[in-house]
Image (spheres, rainbow, N blue to C red):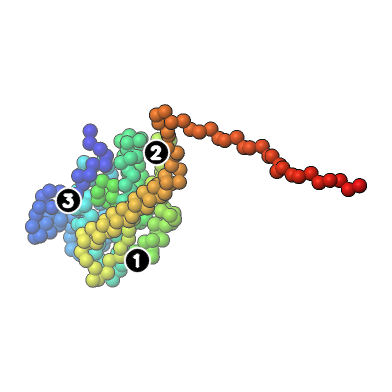
Amino acid sequence: MSSVFDSRLQLPSSLAAASAPRRHKLLQSLAARLGFAGSSTRKHDGTTARAVAAVATPSRPGWSHNMAAMLAAGETMVAWARRDKLPLSIAVFDLNDLPELETVFGPKIARDVVAQVVLRLQGVATSKGLVLRTDATVFTVLMPGFGRDRAQLAIQTTMGSPCCIELDADDHEIVLVPEFKIHTLRADSSALSQVYLDLRCAISEAQKREQRRQRYLQLERESHTRPLELRTGGERTPSRARRPAFVPAATIPMPLKR
């Protein structure tokens, strides 16, 4: 049985290997199947968002295609935002302790946790936003109409500060602490795919810095708690020398006055 967090979750091979024109057609086809077909003037409503967010349910066999779904739906949101001169923020969350959770609690609880994470992130995105699982431990949230400050406030309101996700799964209380980055798209921003990759790289660098910090702290603790070396062979540890008794210095007696 494959892991719930199988890392083979990138673009479908037919899409990743396609030329640029072919890739565009494939994305359009995927967008049509997800409910994003039509002209750019089509309204983006909560029904459409929920239809796409449903792909994030881990029980669906096609959820590994969510990266392509995010690009297809996201580019449509970008077009709407630019047309209406509204901000569009993208937040990428990496919960890299999910594989350990599966090891400890098993795949059933891991699937329940993933479903709860998606619902919690949907609360951040609101009904007009989009939540997709775009890699083994990565979730992407698209928030149309959200500037950076509003996006940060939505995350803080939903998950607290510092950011954490508290869940209940089969009588277990589970706390996940994600690493996340936010970017607000502007008219001169890079393509959505490049923004996504930049956020992933920034998260990876932050995780490496944290690992180095934890390693340094561990070495510091070990250096202060290192036990004394054990003596081997015929060597004997000398016993503590007995403290000498106090002996007053000798004095010359003086004659007594008459």
Q: Is residue 235 above or below residue 150?
A: above
Residue 248 sits above or below residue 76 on the image: above
Image height of 97 relative to 153, above or below: above
Residue 233: image location, x then y, percent: 39, 29
Residue 62 horizontal side relative to residue 161, left or right: left
Can you tell which mark lies on residue 147?
1
The amino acid at mark 3 is Leu
Q: CA distance from mark 1 to mark 3?
A: 28 Å
Left or right: 41, with 87 as reference point: left
Q: Secondary structure at mark 3?
A: loop
| Number of residues whose C-alpha sits closer than 10 Å to that of mark 2, classed few (under 14), some (14–19) or many (20 or more) | some
**Residue at 35%, 35% in the rendered image:** 104
- Name the disc covering residue 11, or none: 3
Cβ–Cβ under 8 Å for marks 3 and 2? no
Q: Position of residue 221 (x, y in %)?
A: 43, 46
Within the image, what quadrant is residue 185 found in? bottom left
Q: CA distance from mark 1 to mark 2?
A: 33 Å
Closer to us: 101 or 117: 101
Query: CB under 8 Å between callouts 1 and 2?
Result: no
Residue at 44% x, 39% y is: 227
Residues at marks 3 and 2, CA–CA distance in whole angstroms: 30 Å
Numbered circle sitting on residue 220: none
Closer to the N terminus: mark 1 or mark 2? 1
Q: Position of residue 206 (x, y in %)?
A: 32, 56
Q: Amino acid at mark 2?
A: Ala
Q: Is residue 258 left or right of residue 52?
A: right
Q: Amino acid at mark 1?
A: Gly
The residue under the point 27% across, 39% down is 4
**Residue where numbered disc 2 is placed:** 169
Q: Residue at x 29, y 47 (%)?
A: 137
Q: Quadrant of the N terminus?
A: top left
Q: Nearer the viewer, mark 1 or mark 3?
A: 3
